[in-house]
Image: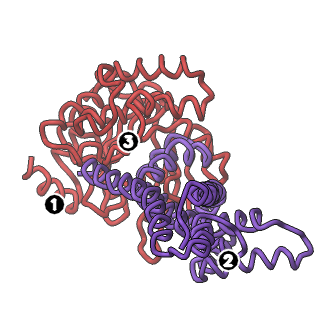
Chain colours: A red, B purple
Amino acid sequence: MLNSAKDQSKLISLEDVQKWYGTFHALKSISLSVRKGERIVLCGPSGSGKSTLIRCINALETIEEGKIVVEGHVLDGTTRSIDAVRREVGMVFQSFNLFPHITVLQNCTLAPMRVRGVSHADAERLARKYLERVRILDQADKYPAQLSGGQQQRVAIARALCMEPKVMLFDEPTSALDPEMVKEVLDTMIGLARDGMTMICVTHEMGFARQVADRVIFMDSGEIVEEAEPEVFFKSPEHQRTKTFLGEILAHH
Amino acid sequence: MGPIGEDQFLFLMQGLKWTVLLAIVGFIGGGIFGTLIALLRTSKNKVARTITAGYIGVVQGTPLLMQLFVVYYGVALLGIDVNAWIAVAVAFTLHASAFLGEIWRGSIEAVPKGQTEAANALGLHYVSRMKDVILPQALKISMPATIGFLVQLTKGTSLAAIVGFIELTRAGQIISNQTYRPLLVFGIVGAIYFIICWPLSYAGSRLEKRMAKAAR
């Protein structure tokens, strides 16, 4: 495990969050707080609500009850609060979601120019900096479809970083990748973690969780079942559901 | 039977000029209002969605010929004296905007949802999200259908003859009446339509094939 966060200030807090899809109770009374610099891995069986949970944090999903606060901004459904939160939060998707009709560089400069009003020259400088950081600057003028999955996902990480977020959300960032490309993306994420980025990662990469996470949270059926430091989580899980899940997932790895 | 000489041919070319102009005006007018309709059809506002859906339904459910009559005589009823040119341009714009609006609505909805989500996650607002992310992709998706409609529209301009507009078909009819050689005249007229429309169709199907390949 890397050094635990020294800065104890709360960056994200969820209080008693409830979400339904029609009659399906997707999130059941979720409470969670994330300190600055903290790295959290969210895991659980599919349909357990882990993706839904992080998508609520940047208001891609709305919640029915409860309270979400990000860097002091309360998500209250207004455009202003959503904008404020999204400025602090970067997101990386399972399916990359790069914009296919523009180049890698333009993918990275678009939001800084449109959202933060950065000049074209500055946006390019920013983009080059972060593309360099994910070691893909040499592909800057290509279109997303010309890159491999792993490269595309690294571009997606750079694109999010260009907005200089305070926290990064990863929604199963390696699940759509061929096995040989998983490592390059995980290495990029480990690099980010080393640099002190606050991260919430939905992933089944337990090696990554062991190496990087300050806390592992296990969700099932829309609830947080268990949370612990990775050492404890993997060695001596408390709940039967966690044990079953770990048994299944580790058998595959 | 009279001969078909240079004069007759020039007369047909005059008609052709109006056919092309009418198609262009319909397409530009339809393009502008069609974009608006497509955006309203895909907006969150239920009233806007319902009204535009109704508009599309009415225009798609009635013949173009009838729409031409309604605009031509309807505008006159309002006491506004319009020439055939304006009436026809308005009718074609109304017609094209409904069809293009519906084609483009489908294209906007065909852009993967992840694109909207990524744009939202980056904090992009509606205008930028549409202009920079969704519409360029939707436009590409819509190209085959858009070109197909442009071909329909070009051929549809022949209906403008009914309100006294001398476009290509009407010009052909006049020449035919002068020369008593309908088969030859309408053969030429048909060939001219084909020369305009076929390259468009061909470009459309080429584009479609290229996109199918790119999607693989």
Q: Is residue A54 visible?
A: no
Label 1, on which residue?
A244
The earlier-in-sequence mark between 3 and 1 is 3
Single out the residue that lies furthest toward the right: B79
Chain letter, disc 1 residue: A
Vertical order, B128 against B184 (above or below)? above
> Helix or strand or loop: what does disc 3 sit on?
loop
Report the mark closest to the observer, 3 or 1: 3
The residue lying toward the viewer, choosing from A226 and B10, is: B10
Amino acid bearing label 1: Thr
The residue lying toward the viewer, choosing from B191 and A83, is: B191
The residue lying toward the viewer, choosing from B211 and A45, is: B211
Q: Quadrant location of residue B30?
A: bottom right
Instruction: Identify which residue is drawn at 77% across, 63% down.
Output: B86
Label 2, on which residue?
B162
Label 3, on which residue?
A100
Report the mark closest to the observer, 3 or 2: 2
